[in-house]
Image (cartoon, grey):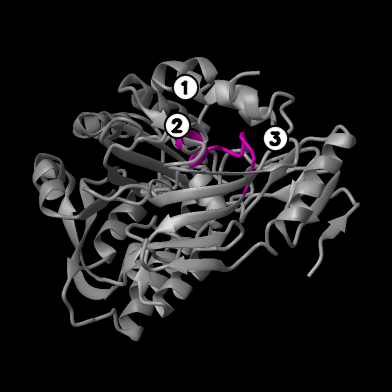
Amino acid sequence: MSTTVSGKSGTWRNWAGNVTAHPVREVAPASVEELSAAVRKAAEDGLRVKAVGTGHSFTSTAATDGVLIRPQLLTGIRRIDREAGTVTVEAGTPLKRLNVALAREGLSLTNMGDIMEQTVSGATSTGTHGTGRDSASIAAQVRGLELVTADGSVLTCSEKENVDVFAAARVGLGALGIITAITFAVEPLFLLTAREEPMPLDRVLAEFDELWTENEHFEFYWFPHTGSTNTKRNNRSAGPPKPVGQLSGWFEDEFLSNGVFQVANWVGRAVPAAVPTIAGVSSRALSARTYTDIAYRVFTSPRRVRFVEMEYAVPREALTETLRELKAMVDRSTLRVSFPVEVRTAPADDITLSTASGRDSAYIAVHMFRGTSYQAYFTAAERIFTAHGGRPHWGKVHTRDADYFAEAYPRFGEFTALRDRLDPDRRFGNDYLRRTLGA
């Protein structure tokens, strides 16, 4: 295969439709060498360069007015090292394809987010995470990276090689280079038993520490305008597999969680006054269920209803107070919120700009249906999150800048100094990085 180049200027849009970009040209390199050549050519033409995956970020972290790199030809597994317990995969590989390929080999990632449409490079670069008491984000499972830097050279890093780059580039925001391959830690394929159960919000918050301690993976969804949640506990199982039945799975995951939910949001957007009633019905629609399946099928679920999202990581010990303040704000406001609030956790890690860097974290994600005004809700929520020292997810809507991050991340200066060394001319820069990282 060879590089495909489009000289026509076009419009790129992200999945949610809230970010657009107009690159001068698009390039889909078929090899690392071709990607290096594309970066050098961009430099000759005085153009900036950004790589874009599936567009599941809600920020403009991948937007560019220069050269847009599409990695769809850089896919597949390079090698599996069973002795070391690692797999090296091309950067443009979708997580969904990686999960299927690993399962065929009897292998699995340790933890996953709740969707798997993203490319591996996009998911790691923005700090995509699931929920876990002991197991952390996708980036925390990385054992090595290969990336093309601003001068077109190829740099590899790991816990033993270019350690400073490795510490930063696992959540690198595309600011340090374009990732071409990732080495992940993997383990033998395992089963998870999921227990999904409605529960009053007050009970969840009162028992949160206990629920977190007793379960390997605990998360819940609170339905605004109600006192109801739906909880999910995932724990390893010896089996046997008991997956969700085809009919019941279609009814719960497609008909209720996507089809009916889509219609409900259309109604809520057209008639905002109906949203609290819809929220009450939605909170009662999903029933308790238990099932056992291979890990990625339990961690992830289909998300077909499009939305815009803000998510902040707060210190885990601040979760209950933060969420109570969020609920009080919604209750006393005129806001009409049709999407549930998602709550997850992650242990501390050692990645420079990971939202869990150096501290056990809880994540609170607020959403609004695509096409619905979200600014008032997100502004009010962000005020609460930042009051508790929150760190925004790099790929989700926020208004924070470099001054804020310099206070929020003790090692922020390490990252910006490394960026100055690897990309002094800001070949991989854009407006988003200028705001979040500084000039």
CA neighbours of label 3 inside 10 A, class few (<14), some (14 to 19), many (20+): many
Q: Residue drawn 19% across and 55% down? A: 216
User: Is residue 324 at least partly visible in the picture?
Assistant: no
Query: What SS does tag 2 mark?
Result: loop
In the visual, does 419 lie left or right of 429?
left
**Residue at numbered disc 1:** 412
The disc label shown at residue 120, or none: none
Magenta highlight on residue 35: no
CB contact under 8 Å: marks 2 and 3: no
Residue 290, position as x, y percentages in the image: 19, 72
First to last magenta residue range: 167-179
- The quadrant of the rendering that contains the C terminus is top right
What's the amino acid at mark 1?
A: Phe
Marked residue nearer the N-terminal end (2 or 3): 2
Query: What SS does tag 3 mark?
Result: loop
CA neighbours of label 1 inside 10 A, class few (<14), some (14 to 19), many (20+): some
CA neighbours of label 2 inside 10 A, class few (<14), some (14 to 19), many (20+): many
Question: Distance of mark 2 from mark 3, alpha carbons?
Answer: 17 Å
**Residue at numbered disc 3:** 428
Q: Main secondary structure of the magenta part?
A: loop
Task: Identify whether 11 is placed above or below 60.
Answer: below
Residue 46, position as x, y percentages in the image: 86, 32
Marked residue nearer the N-terminal end (3 or 1): 1
Please tell me which residue lies in front, 276 or 343: 343
What's the amino acid at mark 2?
A: Leu
Question: Distance of mark 3 from mark 1, alpha carbons?
Answer: 18 Å
Q: For residue 297, what is the image quadrant?
A: bottom left
**Residue at numbered disc 2:** 353
Residue 268, position as x, y percentages in the image: 46, 52
In the visual, does 177 lie left or right of 324?
right
